[in-house]
Amino acid sequence: MCGIIGIIGQTPVNQAIYDGLTVLQHRGQDAAGIVTIDDENRFRLRKANGLVSDTFQQIHMLRLQGNSGIGHVRYPTAGSSSVSEAQPFYVNSPYGLTLVHNGNLTNSDELKQKLFTLARRHVNTNSDSEALLNILAYHLDQSEEINLQAADIFTAIKKTHADISGAYACVAMIIGFGMVAFRDPYGIRPLVLGKRVLDNGFVEYGFASESVALDTIGFEFVRDLKPGEAIYVDFSGNFYSEQCAASPDLCPCIFEYVYFARPDSCIDGVSVYAARVHMGERLGKKIAREWKDLDIDVVIPIPETSNDIALRIAHELGVPYRQGYVKNRYVGRTFIMPGQEQRKNSVRRKLNTISSEFKGKNVLLVDDSIVRGTTSEQIVEMARHAGAKKVYFASAAPEIRYPNVYGIDMPTADELIAYGRSVEQIAELIGVDRLIFQDLNDLTESVRQENPSIRHFDASVFTGEYITGDISKAYLDNIAFARNDKAKQDQSKDATNLEMHNER
């Protein structure tokens, strides 16, 4: 998924970007990076593998001088876990350009070939974000004006839109000119705008993946960027915006509301918290309707994303809501982890049971979704070990049967437990007495209830219908080969060996 942030203004930004990234840490724990522009028009960059708190020590923060900067937290979907693929990326030509990207491009191989053929630009990593940066740099370089104007920047972004496919929310800085933020024509990945007025009247602007990052650093939320829109703010504080896509159509990723985004965020006019409450209401009604024969003693969420959903389900069913699992907050998200064994080992470190809430009871466990099923299976085992008499399971999302190509680590259908299986077969595999999934229509209506103007969502993991319309079976086969668990383990070994070699 990744999380991005950018601030342009008249006051030092290093601490604000750091604070914003810590709030976005849930979007990626693999690597973090910040780049600023100092008074001598030089990039100041720090990036490394690890959490934000591990990556930036006092010595690094002191070096990140400047009143404008961008930051990124990463979890890899394309490329490897090597620190060389951590963001921000930068290029020296034209002007000096740096960029952060959330999403995934679906034509990065073609882009790299085009860059080499037309522009003699070499992309040094497997990261699609580096290809995106170089495509933008190439189009900026085609401007006839040495002193870029807003129109020149928007023209370059229009050409970039025409070249690239997939999901992308980006923030970039151009030395000597300003900051530009833009979003893909479907608005698949989120990007919001905020502002802060200084005592002297100067307006500082901020961009972030989620509104909560702006809240934390004292910026007023202004609005979401529209799909296909670009916003340019120069270093004098002048603000420009323009629609740069030919046929924009808002189709946000519905998994943001199910799982990824924080509940205190607002994305595309939708309160994530409210959407999850609606999910619980609809799923609770479905359970009451279809499971009349079951005697449920208690509803227990799998923390933390499903807490609000489970509370509403308990209300609909008229049964107690209890916290039966205690979460260790210092273990990363398990389905993001790059290997089956690593995911298995992490679940026990991540959760522990309160046995008294399970012993002798028929429990309904509630989770936001079931992806590979590894985590769900172990959670059910823990419930039975804690003394549960019967274990039922409810998923706030429908069956995930198809890979995601827009920036979520669900690369191969064979690794998805629901692929080619019935609900009964899935229930048997994860070891529950009964299993129920949210209906897709109920899920989309739960989100749309907060913003009826959203006509479509990217729900490809449930339907197999990809909103960009350019995903072939050959493409899916290719990413399945390149990004399955074994490939990730091999890439991780290669990256580790390379970094050890570089340190010698």
Image (cartoon, helix red, strand yellow):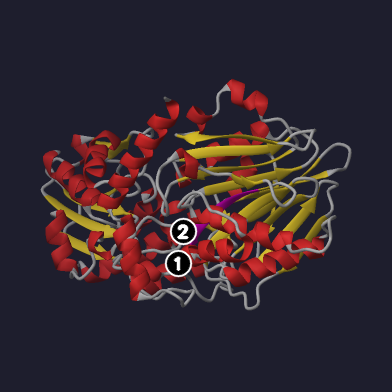
Q: Position of residue 71 (x, y in %)?
A: 60, 42
The answer to whether residue 112 is magenta is no
Q: Position of residue 246 (x, y in %)?
A: 65, 77
Q: Is residue 109 above or below residue 75?
A: below
Q: Residues within 10 Å of mark 2 (few under 14, many from 20)?
A: many
Is 498 situated left or right of 160 in this image?
left
**Viewer can see residue 227:** no
Quadrant of res 463: bottom left
Is 189 situated left or right of 385 in this image?
right
Residue at left offset 40%, top offset 68%: 443
Residue at left offset 41%, top offset 51%: 308
Q: Position of residue 299 (x, y in %)?
A: 27, 50
Q: Residues within 10 Å of mark 1 (few under 14, many from 20)?
A: many
Instruction: Say whether disc 1 or disc 2 marks the residue closer to the N-terminus.
Output: 2
Nearer to the camera, 500 or 362: 500
Nearer to the camera, 165 or 198: 165
Residue type highlighted by circle 1: Ser
In the image, the segment drawn in magenta is 98-105
Between the residue at mark 1 and the residue at mark 2, the CA separation in whole angstroms equals 10 Å
Q: In the rendered image, which residue does mark 1 sit on?
A: 446
Q: Secondary structure at mark 1?
A: helix
Q: In the rendered image, which residue does mark 2 sit on?
A: 257
Residue farthest toward the top in the current orientation of the protein: 59
Q: Is residue 418 above or below residue 246?
A: above
Residues at circles 1 and 2 in contact by the CB criterion of under 8 Å? yes
Residue type highlighted by circle 2: Tyr
Residue at left offset 38%, top offset 32%: 330
